[in-house]
Image (tube, helix red, strand yellow):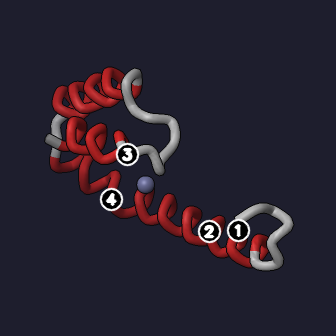
Amino acid sequence: MTPDDERFDAKTTVLIETVGHHVQEEETDWFPKVRDALGRKELQEIGARMRDVRATAPHRPEHPGSLRAADALLG
Ligand SMILES: [Zn+2]
């Protein structure tokens, strides 16, 4: 879809609302639980791994390598 598509504004509005809701949920619900469950050291190690894989992660989500990068991060 391109920005001149008649559904673009509606789709974009829904996307913005959905992402906003997701972020809200993470910050108020999930992150505090993760912070409570994991120690500071483990969180720092996860952060370091994420920084490492960022270098090789694809920049376009539709790239076939996306799933492999996600596997590498989660595995
Ligand atoms: Zn998220």
Q: Which residue is mark 1?
A: 12
- Mark 2 nearby-residue class (10 Å; few <14, some 14–19, many ≥20): few
Q: On the rendered structure, is 37 left or right of 30?
A: left
Coordinates of residue 51 in the picture (x, y in percent): 36, 24
Report if the beta carbon of the residue with label 1 is closer than 8 angstroms to ligand 1.
Answer: no
> Is 65 in front, or is 14?
65
At label 4, which amino acid type do we have?
Trp
User: Quarter holding the N terminus?
Assistant: bottom right
Q: On the rendered structure, is 44 left or right of 59?
A: left
Q: Secondary structure at mark 1?
A: helix
Q: Which residue is mark 3?
A: 64
Query: Do residues under tags 4 and 3 come within 8 Å of each other at their CB atoms?
Result: no
Query: Do residues under tags 4 and 1 come within 8 Å of each other at their CB atoms?
Result: no
Q: Label 4 to label 1, Cα distance in Å? A: 25 Å
Q: Label 2 to label 4, Cα distance in Å? A: 20 Å
User: Quarter holding the C terminus?
Assistant: top left
| Residue 15: assigned label | 2
Q: Is residue 25 above or below residue 53?
A: below
Instruction: Name the residue rendered at 24%, 33% in the picture.
Output: 43
Closer to the chain start, of discs 1 and 3, is 1
Q: Label 4 to label 3, Cα distance in Å? A: 29 Å
Instruction: Name the residue rendered at 43%, 65% in the picture.
Output: 25
Q: Label 1 to label 3, Cα distance in Å? A: 24 Å
